[in-house]
Amino acid sequence: MQALPGYTNCFVCGKSNPIGLNIVFFKDQDKVKAEFIPESKHQGFKGIVHGGILFSILDEIMGRTAVVTKGVMTMTVEINIRYRKKALVGEKIVFTARMTKDLGRMIEAQAEARSEDGALLTEAKGKFIVVSKEMQKEVEEYM
């Protein structure tokens, strides 16, 4: 698997963001993968990972599917998410995403979060618009 670059101050992947999640995403053929072990600072109810944290990671990983399949960056248009089982603080979560449709200026992707033993925790589908070449160049300059 090949590590994908992060965006300097991104909440999800930015290594320079002191309150960020610091997640590294990996290209695995036409998929994107990541792992995360949430801490108590990521909880909503006691011991349970806040849904917004899971949402943020699923958003980021789906957007990155266009980078690995088309070499372009995207911005989120729409996401539908289903929380299936609670994700627990201190337990590794494995995220996987793939692009499901290439619509030219837009892509569709799906992702899931699973516990280390394979139980489905959360699944998402989303639509993402390809950013302009100018914006992509600007983003690449601060990676």
Image (spheres, rainbow, N blue to C red):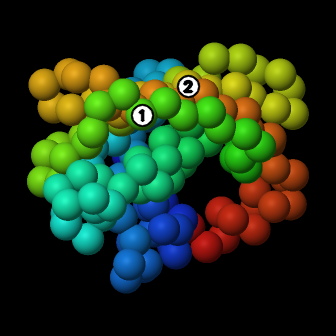
Q: Quadrant of residue 116?
A: top left
Name which residue lies at 65% across and 63% down: 140
Direction from residue 97 to residue 89 in the image, left or right: left
Instruction: Provide the secondary structure element on which disc 2 rests.
Output: strand
Mark 2, mark 1: which one is toward the viewer?
A: 1
Q: Which residue is mark 2?
A: 110
Q: Which mark is residue 83?
A: 1
Residue type at the position of mark 1: Tyr
118 or 26: nearer the viewer: 118
Of label 2 and label 1, which has the lower sequence position? Answer: 1
Residue 62 rendering spot, x and y as whole percentages: 56, 37
Q: Which mark is residue 35?
A: none
Name which residue lies at 74% across and 28% down: 107
How busy is the neighbourhood of tag 1: few (under 14 within 10 Å), some, or many (20 plus)? some
Q: Quadrant of the C terminus?
A: bottom right
Instruction: Answer above or below: position of 98 versus 78.
Output: above
Q: Tell me the CA gap for discs 2 and 1.
A: 14 Å
Q: Is residue 54 visible?
A: yes
Residue type at the position of mark 2: Gln
Instruction: Provide the secondary structure element on which disc 1 rests.
Output: strand
Name which residue lies at 22% across and 23% down: 119
Instruction: Answer above or below: position of 101 versus 46.
Output: above
Direction from residue 120 to residue 137 in the image, left or right: right
